[in-house]
Image (cartoon, helix red, strand yellow):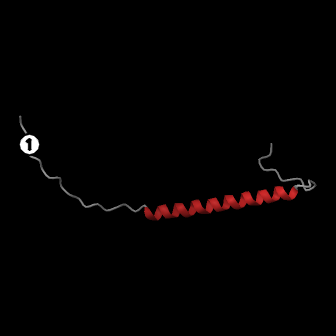
Amino acid sequence: MDIFTVPDPNDPNMGYAYLVMILVFIAASFSVYRLKKASKRTKTKSEPKAYDMYEPESKPDRKD
């Protein structure tokens, strides 16, 4: 079984098959481009946030 089949050149509807293959390729390349761009954006934004350290207020001990 072939994973990728090329349309038969003798088929009268061959142009439609090639057109669909081109559109699928364009959509896939656009999706990969967008995913790479989003991946780069998240890498640059993933810097750790600096938090100020503080000590909690001490509460008096209750003994009942």
Answer left or right for 53 relative to 31: left
| Of the pair 57 and 3, the residue shown nearer to us | 57
Q: Quadrant of the C terminus?
A: top left
Residue 27 in which image quadrant:
bottom right
54 w.r.t. 63: above or below: below
Residue 37 in which image quadrant:
bottom right
Q: Residues within 10 Å of mark 1 (few under 14, many from 20)?
A: few
Q: Residue at x 53, y 61 (%)?
A: 38
Q: x, y (%) of residue 32?
A: 62, 59
5 w.r.t. 43: above or below: above
Answer left or right for 37 relative to 51: right
Q: Quadrant of the N terminus?
A: top right
Q: x, y (%) of residue 3?
A: 77, 47
Q: x, y (%) of residue 8?
A: 89, 53
58 w.r.t. 49: above or below: above
Q: x, y (%) of residue 30?
A: 65, 62
Give the labeled residue for mark 1. Answer: 61
